[in-house]
Amino acid sequence: MLPPNKSVRPVPRPVGPSTSPAPNVTTSIPGLFPPAASPSEPTVVTPTPSGSGGAGPSHSSPAQPSQPAQATPPTIPPSPAATCCPQVSTFAKAASRTVYFGFDDNTNQVVKANADEYWIPPTDSKSRPSDREDPDGSNWLSVSVGSETEVVIAFVGQSGPACIGNCTFVVDAPAVAEVVTTNVTANNVAFKVKGKAAGECSVEVKCNGKTLGWVHVWCAVATTINLEVASIVTPNSRAAAYVVADLESYINAIYADLFISVSITDKGPITVVPPAAGYLTSTRHYLALDTLVQAAATTAFTAPYRLLYYVNTGAFSGNYGIVPGGVGTGKAGFAFFDHDIQGSYNTMAHELGHSLNLSHPLHDSDGDEFPVRHRAGLAGGNVMPLDPWNLMGYKGTLPQRGPSRRDLRYRQWKKCRRV
């Protein structure tokens, strides 16, 4: 049985006898058809006249025509089978946060559902846009210099091993990152990218010269920042019950997206006496309280960032936080909690984000952290303005925010202060 996709061509048969000399046919397979010998010239014997001493007339046979050489069948290569290719390649978040850094599937989200994604319909030709933030439904992946991050790669259409194995992976800025997993033959498998230098690049999946899909990569050098934490004890507040190792672990798990880790120094409970009972009423009062805490500390605050717990004993604290100095000022971040320590860790991570220059989605007026098209109220706006699952979002109850408000986006990766 002939293999599939092979066209059948008739093989020429040798030509019949002919008086014409055989053409000189060569073959590309040595030894398969040895060349035929050249035909001999016919030999003619001249008769000897009688009386000349010969035995008599010579009766020579007439010259017999030689058999023509048979033509060597030309070698006909088999018709090339077209290389099979999947129609689309996509990248998705890995199952565990422990195997990847940041994964942003929202920045390039399309304005309207099921429109303009490069994989719909899969038969469309695909060409990666020059603008990496084009709302084409593609994704962003972060990786630190010298480290590997993982995503899941999947294929649509002809997604069997034979076709997937024909795909190659091209990085448009190979100085920034490289593909570690090059031999991909199965669908929905781990795909790894390694960071090489700070910058941005895209990984394209190609087959037969055609683009099947892409993922964008942001790379930066990992860094560690120093952070100091304390509880404010006043006539109206008590020491918080946080565990510094747990707080540090929680914050680090979130900021791994940005390759930022924190080193926390616990200053413990610090007792101060505010000048008035109704102290927590304004930004001016919060800044004054921060000054009192620094003055009362047994050892001086030296880290560039501070997080202070204030657990109100007289009334409900409100489950909120504030950076009274403003976004990006590096002033102390306050967390006001009187229950749910796990939730307080999330608020602390959020307030640290403000100290590191990050805004709420709704308050990003210039769009340097969130594309303008994501704002609600605009035609076709595709993301809720408060972005509740983003670390810097703030909509939703504490049980919702505590375990879930973690994600950061590509523009936040770039905006966040790293020193």
Image (tube, helix red, strand yellow):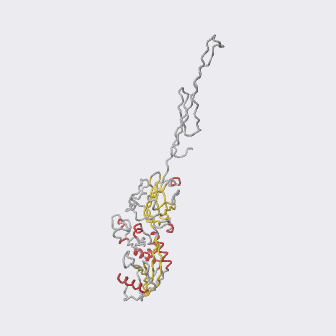
Q: Quadrant of residue 219?
A: bottom left
Q: Farthest residue to the right: give it.
A: 55
**Is 166 rendered above or below residue 15?**
below
Q: Position of residue 49 (x, y in %)?
A: 61, 12
**Is 7 rendered above or below residue 17?**
below
Q: Quadrant of the C terminus?
A: bottom left
Q: Position of residue 118 (x, y in %)?
A: 42, 57
Left or right: residue 281 compared with residue 198? left
Q: Position of residue 189 (x, y in %)?
A: 52, 60
Tag count in the figure? Answer: 0
Q: Farthest residue to the front: give it.
A: 53
Left or right: residue 116 compared with residue 192? left
* Residue at image point 54% right, 26% down: 19
* Residue at image point 53% right, 46% down: 4
Q: Farthest residue to the top: give it.
A: 51
Q: Quadrant of the N terminus?
A: top right
Q: Position of residue 414 (x, y in %)?
A: 40, 68
Left or right: residue 138 compared with residue 161? left
